[in-house]
Image (cartoon, helix red, strand yellow):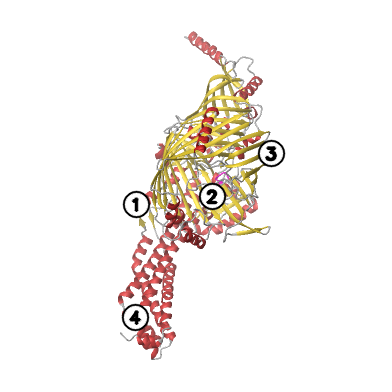
Amino acid sequence: MKKEMIGIALRNVFKNKRRSILNMLTFAVSVSVILLGFGMIKGQFDAIYTRMIDLRTGHIKIYNKDYPAVKSTMPLDRVINDPEKVLAAIAGTPHMVAASQRIIHPGIISNSKKKMGIVINGIDMEKEKKILTAYDNVEGSLLPEDGAHVLCGKALADMLGFKPGSGLLLFSQTSGNMNNLVDADVSGVYSIGFDAMEKAEIYVPIAFARQFLDMDNKATEIIIRLENAGYVPQAKKYIQQVLAKGFPGLTVVDWKEENADLFELAKAKMGSFKVMALVFLFLSFFIIVNTMTMSVYERTAEIGTLRAIGFEKGYIMQMFILEGFFLSVLGVILGWILSAPIIYYLNVHGLVLDVMKTASSTAMPLTDVLKAINTPGDWIISGVICVISGVLGAYFPAKMAADMNVVNALKRGVR
Amino acid sequence: MKKIAFLTAGLIAVFCASVLALDAKYTKAYAEDLLKTVDKSLYPAVYKSVITMTTVRAGRNPLSNTFEVLSKGADKSLMKITAPARDKGKKILKNGDNLWMFMPDISRPIRLSANQSFMGSTFSNEDLASSGWEDNYTAEITKQKDTLILLTLKAKKNDVAYARIDMWLDDTTKIPTEMTYYGLSGKAIKKMYMSNIQKIAGIMRPIDMKMDDLIEEGSYTQVKLESMEALESLPEYTFDPTQMGR
Amino acid sequence: MKRLLFAAFFAVFAAGVFAFDFNLDARSDFTYTSFMMNSAYDAMAQAETASAFSTYEEIRVKAKDTIGQVKFDFDARAYLYPQTESVTYTVDSACFSYAQGQFVLTAGKQRMKWGTAYFFNPTDRLQPAVNILNPTEDLEGIYALRGELTTDFCTPLVVIMPRLNGSQPDSAFDAAARVYKLIGTCDVYLDYIYRPDGDSAGAAFSWDTGFFVVNFEAALDADPPEGAETIQLGGRPYSTAMTLGVMKMVSQDTSIFAEYYRNGGGFGSAAYSSLVNTSGIGPFLSKKDYIAYSGSYTWNETYQFSLTGIHGLDDGTIFMYPSIGWVGNQNFDVSLYFLQNLTAGGTREGNYSTPFYSETELRINAYF
């Protein structure tokens, strides 16, 4: 009986080829859209997170407890008082590559003809090299240990006409809000292909920053890089324990918290994609409801005959649901086959787009090559979702067919 | 030859002495007194004045405004824009860390973020309010050229706006003619020139002031004191945002 | 009418002769409207002639004078409509104030705009409502007697407003009281308005957080419309309304505003539909949820660009309002506004409150 039923359902699938192909195609499109969309969004944000970790945030940062709440104003009065001691205390952090102290504060840079607002990053160059990749592509030289030397971004250098060796003026307000201005020079120009950051962030030796901003031996943050992001929970826990013991005024923030705004953005993007995927699923759902309803009408006489010769209501219903199931399974398989080469290409080679060039001026660091990330789970989930919507879509016409009055159905005659 | 060298050295010494040697009266105490006088000569404690301010920034159109200013102490001031005609009736009220703007067509105070530069000019808020120099700076006379003396102000602590202010002033009028503001590093940030000294609000004061922005060449702000009147007091409601429409 | 006009011109003339501080602004306005021909248009066309092209000339006179403790303030606008060759005028304020110590008494027609938000002011219940599509448009004041006392602790204010149209003979006036207090960098206002036919209360604050200014307003109104969200106070229902917004002046040239408005006393969709069905037209901003935002940027003190958007969240009504202006001369400027009603179809508010697709407006202002 079961086998027979499967046979009938399958035969019905191939009976009206045009309609079935339409049905399968809609499922194929749905499954491809879901696969591609998930892959691209995951890929895009993975790339952004990686870039953010590499360029700005490292894996973990340590701040004064009161600092994160007012981080955007970059104050100098909520600091780490003994950064050297903290660095020594966390030296044993598991899987740590390097840790370094920094001072971050807004300022103004000028070529004496034109001034621009920037963020001054006082850094320990030797250690920072191991933490961020922002310094990998530098024209000129990296920062020395001390002295009024500046590493500035290419976009800023283009705007102010800076080259390695150019003189400049650096203005800021010290920890006591005293105005300060010094002559400095450009030691190097970094390029990262991300305009917003190249324009805004300049780097100076931390020893110089301390003197310039009247900061004694303090720092505003400590940045830490681990072997990879997977070790973050373990390392964070270790550092938390160290701080709780010796430095109760400090707090640990991981790259996810540091990039909280980006996470929100990712969530929002994923959310809007989910809406799009839902639209496609609804579309397939309605198409299958429609086509199945039509086929129920066409096969009214056949259903009547089957019922008359003793087939149960449940049997008729299962038959139609099975038909929907087969249509969606075949559609999913078709979608998988059709999208597999594209997905393979996007996952392995990625997308090289001209758009990415202009995107360097957006607020997010994008890579030149955008790779999608698709896990086996994505394939299974996208397939299951489509099949469920196929079965659901078949349910209503199936119920209609099963509830048909046998006599009325037979009246319509066999065509 | 030796003679010539000796003579030259002597001449240089005499020349230097004539420029560098200070009159005996220019003691530390004299300098401190002078600072108090200057402090008062720029702004009375409570005053009403009309100023015209022109801001020039390289590559931008110059911007000119005339304000009527009511000021009380270091942290309370109400400015009414009287020119250009388009902005007439707009008011800006500052009370400590609070800043409000009033526009006649909205007719209620709108709060602004206080940490904005003074209407985009080279002047910062502390440059225009009474300076409080005598509390924050020590004074010393370091140079003398005829009646012009250089009063050097050094910050007592590192939490005031400038580390050092060099003020050239005329000892006969006690009015500064040129002031240079230095940052912590000792580099000059702003330079202010004062000229056109006239008797206004009871004492001699500079009418024209020009502030050069040394971070951006060619950018400066010019202030002209159109009128000034020292007042006994101003009622508190003047600085109440609910009364800005009055 | 003629007598009124004469009085107005006399006031203007007198102000011009005696006032110490006298101002004259003029505006020419040309508007082209692309109407939506629906029931709302029909209802509107019954009340006034709606023509695609309209224009007016506005002359505005301001006069101020201070003698000792007394201040006089006169502010009026006259309009000339060339299509109908008619002249109208509005006196926005005509009042004097007297100060004694920290107490200020103001009497006459005066502006009294309350609230801290930029677009939506639920606590602003005294003056006629501001036109949100043009929030900087001049507002007409109200006749009132106002007393205000500035103290170190707070600033209390009392207002008495005579009822001029005498619709209810037994109640001759409305009254209001407000207390203002500055706490740190936050303005706090609490107010209460008494009207015989329904009182209201409100609270507002405006807080400079350093990064941006946060504005908040909340109000309770007695006599709520049917279907309003209410809370019970002393056995009477009050409808609720509130606004939450942020403002930031990014730089001297750039500023941004954003606001969310919840009007608990607003129409639900069903009530709005039935209103539209009976009268053909629906009031503007009378539903429950709105957001509005605005950004403006001035380039080189010469060109001003701004974009304002208003979204009705209940039915998807959208208005976009970009503008470009030339402000290169300090006594003369030209602005072009384009108001686009992005709403069509359904019973959307945009359809039935403002029956036009777009409005293009050219304004030329001169200041003397």
Q: Residue C85 at x, y = what percent?
A: 41, 40
Looking at the rendered structure, the kind of residue marked 1 is Asp
Q: Residue A175 at x, y = what percent?
A: 58, 38
Mark before the other along the chain sequence, 4 or 1: 4
Are dots 2 and 3 on a single chain?
yes
Closest to the camera, between mark 2 and mark 4, is 2
Residue tagged 1: A354
Q: Is residue C285 visible?
A: yes
Is residue B94 depicted above or below A271 in this figure?
A: above
Residue tagged 2: C120
Question: In the image, which disc is placed on residue C153?
Answer: none
Question: In the image, which disc is placed on residue A298?
Answer: 4
Closest to the camera, between mark 2 and mark 1, is 2
Crowding around mark 4 (Cα neighbors within 10 Å: few <14, some 14 to 19, many 20+) is few
* Label 4, label 1: how far apart the Cα atoms are: 52 Å
Secondary structure category for the residue under label 4: helix
Q: Give the magenta part as a residue range.
A: C209-213
Q: Residue C315 at x, y = what percent?
A: 47, 59
Are dots 2 and 1 on a single chain?
no
Specify whether residue C72 is painted magenta: no
Closest to the camera, between mark 1 and mark 3, is 3
Secondary structure category for the residue under label 3: loop
* Label 2, label 3: how far apart the Cα atoms are: 30 Å
Residues at marks 1 and 3 touching, judged by CB atoms closer than 8 Å: no
Looking at the rendered structure, the kind of residue marked 4 is Glu
